């Protein structure tokens, strides 16, 4: 296949600032239209979004290369959309003569790819950069020209309707043969994959004990997930300066996870005269540490941010449930600080590499996930999303415990940091056992009140 995804630092002018974005490499070099698009969206799109876009454009170019002789452009778009959903392997032989080797994708993944490509082609058609006489880059790259031409065809023929790529507006009599958008099937929310709360204490004090030593760092992150309901990426934006003793709750930790870019800089930022400087966390990272926020870098050190509802001036507070978790966090935090204070570091982030190289470097999400999985397996628990034993299962457990405690939906929204109250439905769906118990209790209620029943309790199968 002709494309390979990578990352690059992009300098857009003569200043020293740069953007670190995913790129797509072709035999002719970097795909410049896609690079321009990613740079233009870096202020409002995440690195993970860009990676998915790069993957989508790579799939489209691969499909163009595998089908160079398709005379009807609208056929090309339609067939590409169909192959995303159906895959490219022959059902009879199990082979793929095109060598694309695409597995079957679900409707959600297929539509997501089409939506991203539609937006990209919209942008490319509107900017029309290839028409500029001042931009000679298109002379050297056939892949740039392919994308430009695809955007031109898109704007001329409106071949992409919404995100379906399904209708050729000039061929009405063929519409019955065209792809129809897959209808979203309405389902009840899946069984909430929550971590078993009765095993949490064991996870902390047995699972995170290795070689006779506690992994305080892993314990702290897991407490933030299970006791305060954070997403697994959010603790990786925490600074050392963000943990305090709670003045309203003696002996408990007050933890504030600030927005990684626009959050207020900590108090240790000083000018040459020792005066405290004011600014955002992005400016603090850039000027004091020579770093970018973890939301805009690529590689293992990156950490996502889901644009949550914030509690104050660009931060999220840890709302502990139960309160004992806040006190336990503070005790473990003090033990962790004794370890971390002895290690030299070149960043302000709270969780650092204590033993592995680079010592003092940023602790990564992938490393934590591996440690968490190992801790779960030490308890002889099955590891996986379906069992609720991944790191995200703690957020589900947090939400379920709040629901069972009778917390209102509005407060649940606050504690889970959801912008939309509808977002918490997946976290607060009753379990199957709770649903069955409710049905049993409702039946018993009817029996006690003599409201009647279609069948007796001692039902037996009648013999013929």
Image (tube, rainbow, N blue to C red):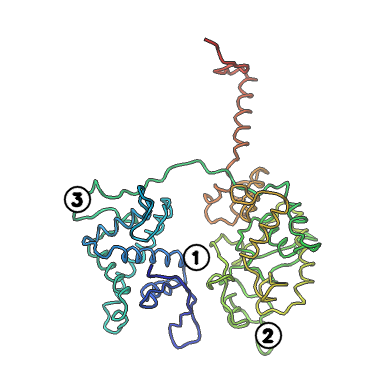
Q: In the rendered image, which quarter contains the N terminus?
A: bottom left
Left of 288 or right of it: where is 87? left
Image quadrant in which you'd find residue 287: bottom right
Residue 275's label in the rendered image is 2
Can you identify the residue that label 1 sits on? 48
Q: Position of residue 39 (x, y in %)?
A: 43, 75
- Residue that mark 3 sits on: 172
The secondary element bearing badge 2 is classed as loop
Q: Secondary structure at mark 3?
A: helix
Q: Is residue 371 left or right of residue 155?
A: right
Q: Quadrant of residue 356?
A: bottom right
Mark positioned earlier in the residue sequence (1 or 3): 1
Q: Are marks 1 and 3 in contact (CB under 8 Å)?
A: no
x and y, in percent, of residue 33 in the image: 36, 74
**Cα distance in 3D space between marks 2 and 1:** 38 Å
The residue furthest top is: 464
- In this orientation, which residue lies closer to the viewer: 358 or 362? 358
Q: Residue at x 81, y 62 (%)?
A: 212
The mark lying in front, picked from 3 and 2, is 3
Examine the image and state in which quarter residue 216 appears: bottom right
Distance from the alpha carbon under mark 3 to that under mark 2: 71 Å
């Amino acid at each position: 296949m002709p494309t390979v995804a990578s990352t690059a630092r992009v300098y857009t002018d003569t200043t020293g600032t740069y953007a670190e974005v995913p790129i797509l490499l072709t035999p002719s070099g970097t795909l410049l239209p896609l690079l321009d698009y990613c740079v233009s969206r870096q202020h409002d799109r995440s690195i993970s979004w860009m990676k998915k876009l790069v993957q989508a454009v790579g799939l489209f170019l691969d499909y163009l290369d595998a089908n160079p002789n398709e005379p009807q452009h609208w056929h090309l778009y339609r067939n590409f959309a169909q192959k995303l959903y159906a895959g490219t392997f022959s059902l009879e032989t199990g082979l793929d003569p095109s060598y694309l080797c695409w597995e079957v994708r679900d409707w959600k993944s297929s539509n997501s790819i089409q939506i991203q490509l539609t937006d990209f082609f919209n942008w490319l058609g509107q900017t029309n950069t290839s028409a500029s006489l001042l931009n000679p880059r298109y002379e050297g790259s056939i892949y740039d020209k392919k994308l430009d031409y695809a955007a031109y065809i898109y704007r001329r023929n409106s071949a992409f309707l919404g995100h379906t790529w399904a209708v050729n507006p000039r061929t009405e009599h063929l519409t019955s043969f065209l792809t129809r958008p897959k209808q979203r099937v309405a389902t009840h929310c899946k069984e909430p994959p929550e971590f078993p709360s009765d095993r949490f204490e064991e996870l902390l004090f047995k699972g995170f004990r290795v070689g006779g030593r506690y992994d305080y760092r892993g314990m702290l992150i897991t407490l933030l997930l299970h006791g305060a309901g954070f997403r697994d990426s959010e603790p990786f934006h925490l600074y050392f300066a963000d943990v305090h003793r709670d003045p309203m709750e003696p002996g408990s930790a007050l933890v504030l996870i600030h927005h990684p870019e626009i959050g207020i800089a900590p108090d240790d930022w000083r000018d040459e005269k020792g005066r405290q400087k004011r600014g955002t966390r992005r400016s603090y990272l850039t000027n004091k540490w020579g770093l970018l926020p973890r939301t805009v870098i690529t590689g293992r050190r990156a950490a996502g941010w889901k644009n949550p509802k914030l509690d104050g001036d660009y931060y999220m507070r840890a709302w502990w449930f139960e309160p004992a978790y806040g006190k336990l966090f503070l005790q473990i935090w003090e033990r962790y600080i004794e370890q971390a204070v002895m290690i030299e570091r070149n960043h302000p982030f709270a969780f650092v590499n204590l033993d592995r190289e680079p010592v003092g470097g940023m602790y990564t999400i992938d490393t934590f996930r591996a440690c968490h999985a190992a801790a779960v397996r030490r308890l002889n628990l099955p590891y996986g999303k379906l069992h609720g034993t991944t790191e995200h299962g703690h957020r589900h457990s947090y939400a379920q415990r709040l629901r069972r405690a009778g917390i209102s939906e509005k407060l649940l929204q606050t504690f889970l940091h959801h912008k939309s109250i509808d977002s918490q439905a997946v976290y607060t769906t009753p379990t199957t056992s709770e649903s069955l118990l409710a049905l049993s209790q409702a039946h018993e209620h009817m029996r006690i009140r003599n409201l009647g029943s279609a069948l007796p309790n001692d039902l037996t199968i009648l013999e013929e």
